[in-house]
Image (tube, rainbow, N blue to C red):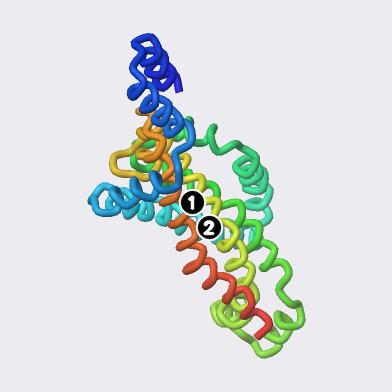
């Protein structure tokens, strides 16, 4: 905005009407670019490797963190349900993770892990409490009649796990994953903006803001929204179907 004001002032002092009009138009584009300008910028980015490579690497980083957080959250929930000491130890720790702001996590992670791992770890930390809470709830709410029947028919531990616990917990796990997917994506992109890894959507958002390239900033933001919608459409729909499968 300051650059736009300087250009307008310089054109006004020089008495150059054409330059004044151009500076006013560019100043408006700097603050709020028009839809056509944003779409044109997005189209220009779409034919370059930068957009596709950045999008692919962001998806890999964030989705790997999502998978890690989901698996770890499920395992920790099973440990808490099976062992009281684990529950007493892990419940406060998960509560701390749930309550800590994302920005604080990102800054701390920058001190502990390499830059390229920060988005994945941050996404995983956002997923873990959600999946942990849902899976733990699913385990403790498993139908006692089913457990009694498994004991009557002398099911072993593995058979009880496979035929009783897994069908009971799966909808809770799917519900947690469906909720956590959007959190992981937003937290991962925010981590990329702050840690600026090589070839990442968040890094391009940061550079666009740094160099006052507002149309580019809007174009990259549209890319973030489009990928978020795509992830929800594919994996969110899958998780919701798994969740509804409980009553089938």
Q: Is residue 124 visible?
A: no
Can you identify the residue that label 2 sits on? 181
Query: Which quadrant of the view contains residue 15?
Result: top left
Element marked by disc 2: helix
Element marked by disc 1: helix
Residue 234 visible in the shown view: yes
Question: Which of these two is toward me, 234 or 223?
Answer: 223
Front in this rendered view, residue 32 or 134: 32
Taking depth in this image into account, of 106 and 21 the one nearest to the observer is: 21
* On-image quarter of the N terminus: top left
Q: Which residue is drawn at the image coordinates 44% and 50% (left, top)? A: 222
- Name the residue: 59% across, 83% down: 163
Question: From the viewer's perspective, is 44 left or right of 8?
Answer: left
Q: Position of residue 131 (x, y in %)?
A: 59, 58
**Relative image position of residue 241 (x, y in whole percent):** 58, 76
Q: Is residue 248 above or below residue 174?
A: below
Quadrant where the image shows the C terminus = bottom right
How packed mark 1 is, by other alpha carbons closer than 10 Å (few <14, some 14-19, many 20 or more), is many
Image vertical order of residue 109 relative to residue 38, above or below? above
Determine the residue positioned at 43% across, 26% down. 24
Other-residue count near label 2 (Cα within 10 Å), few / some / many at <14 / 14–19 / ≥20: many
Tell whether label 1 touches label 2 (CB within 8 Å). Answer: yes
Where residue 70 sits: x, y (%)?
51, 59
């Amino acid at each position: 905005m300051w650059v736009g004001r300087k250009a307008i002032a310089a054109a006004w002092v020089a008495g150059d009407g054409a330059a004044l009009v151009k500076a006013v138009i560019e100043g408006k584009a700097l603050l709020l670019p028009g839809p056509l300008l944003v779409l044109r910028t997005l189209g220009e980015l779409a034919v370059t490797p930068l957009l596709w490579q950045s999008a692919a690497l962001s998806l890999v980083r964030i989705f790997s963190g999502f998978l890690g957080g989901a698996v770890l959250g499920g395992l920790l929930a099973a440990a808490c349900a099976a062992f009281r000491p684990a529950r007493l130890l892990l419940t406060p720790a998960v509560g701390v993770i749930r309550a800590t702001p994302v920005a604080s996590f990102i800054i701390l992670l920058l001190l502990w892990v390499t830059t390229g791992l920060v988005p994945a770890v941050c996404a995983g930390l956002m997923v873990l409490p959600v999946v942990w809470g849902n899976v733990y709830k699913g385990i403790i709410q498993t139908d006692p009649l089913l457990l009694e029947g498994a004991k009557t028919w002398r099911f072993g531990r593995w058979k009880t796990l496979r035929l009783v616990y897994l069908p009971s917990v799966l909808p809770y796990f799917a519900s947690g994953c469906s909720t956590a997917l959007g959190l992981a994506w937003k937290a991962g992109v925010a981590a990329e903006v702050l840690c600026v890894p090589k070839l990442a959507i968040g890094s391009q958002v940061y550079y666009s803001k740094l160099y006052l390239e507002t149309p580019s900033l809007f174009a990259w933001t549209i890319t973030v929204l489009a990928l978020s919608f795509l992830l929800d459409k594919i994996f969110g729909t899958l998780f919701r179907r798994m969740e509804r499968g409980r009553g089938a």
